[in-house]
Amino acid sequence: MRRWLLVNPRSGDGSSVDELCAAAGARGIETHVLRPGEDAHEVSRKADAGVLGAAGGDGTMAAVAAAAVEHGSSFVCVPLGTRNHFARDLGLERSEPVAALDAFDGEERQIDIGRANGRIFLNNVSIGAYAVLVHHGWRRVLDALRRRQRLTVDGETIDTRVLLVANNAYSFSGARKQLDEGLLHVYTPGREIRVAERVEVDARGQRLHVAIDGEGAELEAPVRFEIEPRALRLLLPRRPGA
């Protein structure tokens, strides 16, 4: 079975790229270092591998995971980015990307994915102030925090500075303990407002600026969110003694 790893050198400080590629090659894992102008999802779709891995941050993970779901391939997460929320929720350490390569010979776990108008997300989709930060930087965030955005969630009108649609529930610490609950959780600051398999968010027919797993995007409103239980075949390093 062909095993393939996409490495995004722009994730984090890029200092581990050469070491990681060398370690992958020693294990018989093909690597592709993402070049400027290349799209991570399109490159991964063309890889035609039974196991697709991503070395990067959350946006890179979502792009390669989408290709894995499309082709029915297994997926490996190698944390190399700055925040790595997905890797953290899996219990993988940011400081040990080479150790994460053990997952290519690891054990399978099936986890949920979310979709927003068909686009896959692993963590969450944010609307409001955080999305403004991703699109425009800090100069526009203060304005966004002063204003509430009027949205409708499943027909209910709400005014909020932030709306977060999450793939499984977040705890107060900002982490997820479960990735196969099969439910979306919708949050505004300080409270959870919806738990469902499908959610629709509208903004008077406007296109919505959002952050999908930390990456800026525009989505046609209404945005239809849904969850696909256990749709991603994730490989993780084997537990000691397993």
Image (cartoon, helix red, strand yellow):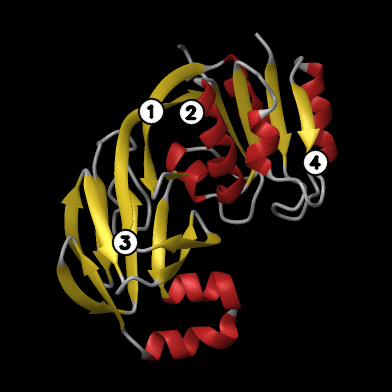
Q: Earlier in the sequence, mark 4 or mark 2?
A: 4
Residue contact between numbered discs 2 and 1, judged by CB atoms under 8 Å: yes
- CA separation, marks 2 and 1? 7 Å
Q: Is residue 5 left or right of residue 185?
A: right
- CA separation, marks 1 and 3? 24 Å
* Neighbour tally class for label 4: few under 14, some 14-19, many 20 plus, Cα within 10 Å: many
Residue 17's label in the rendered image is 4
In this rendering, the answer to whether 102 lies above or below 133 is above
Name the secondary structure under disc 4.
helix
Q: Amino acid at mark 4?
A: Val
Q: Residue at x 64, y 50 (%)?
A: 81
Residue 231's label in the rendered image is 1
Residue 78: image location, x then y, percent: 62, 36
Q: Amino acid at mark 1?
A: Ala
Name the secondary structure under disc 2.
helix
Q: Amino acid at mark 2?
A: Val
Residue 222's label in the rendered image is 3
- CA separation, marks 4 and 2? 26 Å
- Relative depth, front residue between 241 and 215: 215
In this rendering, the answer to whether 124 lies above or below 49 is below
* Residue wearing tag 2: 69
Question: Which image quadrant for residue 205?
Answer: bottom left
* Neighbour tally class for label 1: few under 14, some 14-19, many 20 plus, Cα within 10 Å: some
- Relative depth, front residue between 88 and 143: 143
